[in-house]
Every structure is written in C-alpha cells, then in structure tokens.
Amino acid sequence: MILIPAIDLMNGQVVRLQQGEFDQRKRYSMDPVSLAISYKNAGFTHLHVVDLDAAKAGNPVNSEVILNIVRESSLCVDIGGGLKREEDVAFYLERGVSAVNIGSLAVKDPEKTARLIQIFGENKIYISLDLLGDEVRIHGWQKTAPVIWHEVMSWLIQQGAKTFVVTDISRDGMLSGISEEFYKKIYKRFPSIRLIASGGVADVSDIHKLERLGVWGVIIGKALLEGNLNLNDLEEWLC
C-alpha cells in the first residue's frame, strides 16, 4: 500500500479544509515546495496535490506552484482541481505530473472523461469521486450532483477507468478516523478497482485498517501537518 501525503493549495499557500467547506480552512505557514521536498526526504514516493482555487474556478490557477513541486521534489505527483479541458490535462502530463484527477467532469460528462482515458491512458487519468454519504459532490464539493455514485463508477470502469480516488467528505479534515464501512461498500461492488482512500486518517491504526481492506493507496493530509502521525509510525511503508 502506498502512503500519499496531500498538499491542498489556495492562493499558492498550504491549507486544509474541514469537510470541504472553504470558509472552514486552516492555513499553514510552510512553503508548499519545501513541504513536498520534506516528504521526499522522509521516504514518501507519491504526493497528492489539490488546486482548491481551480476547483472553484473550473480551470487551473496554481499551476506555477504545482510545476515547481513536480520539478523540485521528483515525487510521483497526482493533481486535481478544475481539470476539464484536454489541453489542461496535456499541459500537466507533458510537464512531469504523474496523473491527473478528473472529478466534476467525470460526473457531468463521463463520455468526455472516457475520451481522456483513451487519449492519455488508464494510469494517467484518475477518477476522483467525493462522497457525502451516498451524495456525489462536485465543483469543490459545493454542489450535489443528481447521479448515483456506483452507476458513475460502473460506466467509467467499462470505459477503462482503473484508479479511483474516493473521498469521504464527512471525515475529511476532521481527524476523526476512517469509516471502514464507507470503503467496504465500494469494494463490495467493485472489488477489482485500484482504490485510493481519502478522508479521516487520524493515526496509524487507520492506515492498518485500510491496508487490511486492500486499498492501493491512502491519502494523508491533516494528520501529517498536525503531527498526529510521525515518521516512526510510518516506517514500514516508507522507502
């Protein structure tokens, strides 16, 4: 299982939201590029970066910071937030980003998302689904989509989607621990997907729970930034 630290960007700064609420954010003083380098030096191999400004705007905003992170850290960086156009996806992938997360577009226009998978490949296009219970949230979690989450996943799997980043919004940024049942219901329907779990990791026991469930990767945000997890806790998963 891969541990994936998260860096959320707003106005070029590192922030964390609580349950996706933009007015419930905490700003951190560390420079995002320096933070990414510190994760690399600690033994992490992957990084998840979210452009929160882009998620609201619908187009890339913090691209300069993101590309600096990619260049300076040499991590396998997947990014998300506001990616809807083929040219924006190509822009990042051509400049060293390992994969892009397609979120709102995957829900609103699955046919276009399927074309992106065909163009760039299943390993370069991650499907990002943000769930509040059974509700699918889009546009930076600000709107509820009139779709059923498992129908979206089923159709995209048929079109070649392989990796799904699924966020439990109710737990995100709360340090409240993960919901095993949340991920079990996903694996019950789709046991063969490559699942990256996101939302709620509070301590090393949550990581062990997710590993037992068989997830491919787990995104860790606030628990690292707040010091709830330290490198000794994570040694068995680090390089």
Image (cartoon, rainbow, N blue to C red):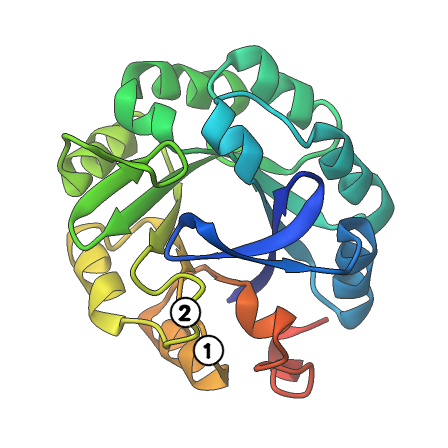
Q: Nearer the viewer, residue 232 or 146?
A: 146
State which tag comes first along the sequence, 2 or 1.
Answer: 2
> What is the total number of numbered labels drawn onto the structure image?
2
Which residue, given by chain and number where applicable, does mark 2 sit on? 174
Q: CA distance from mark 2 to mark 1?
A: 8 Å
Q: Nearer the viewer, residue 57 or 112?
A: 57
Indicate left or right for 21 with 73 as reference. Answer: left
For residue 107, say whether it is visible. Answer: yes
Residue 109 locus on image (x, y percent): 30, 18
Residue 205 locus on image (x, y percent): 43, 85
Determine the residue located farthest toward the right in the rendered image.
72
Mark 2 residue crowding within 10 angstroms, few (<14) / some (14–19) / many (20+)? some
Image quarter in which the C terminus is found: bottom right
Q: Nearer the viewer, residue 181 or 239?
A: 181
Residue type at the position of mark 2? Met
Residue at 61%, 86% in the rendered image: 233
State the SS at label 1: loop
Residue type at the position of mark 1? Ala
Q: Quadrant of residue 187?
A: bottom left
Determine the residue located farthest toward the front in the rendered image.
23
Mark 1 residue crowding within 10 angstroms, few (<14) / some (14–19) / many (20+)? many
* Vertical order, 24 against 56 (above or below): below
Indicate left or right for 155 with 221 as reference. Answer: left
Residue 202 tag number: 1
Residue 20 locus on image (x, y percent): 40, 50
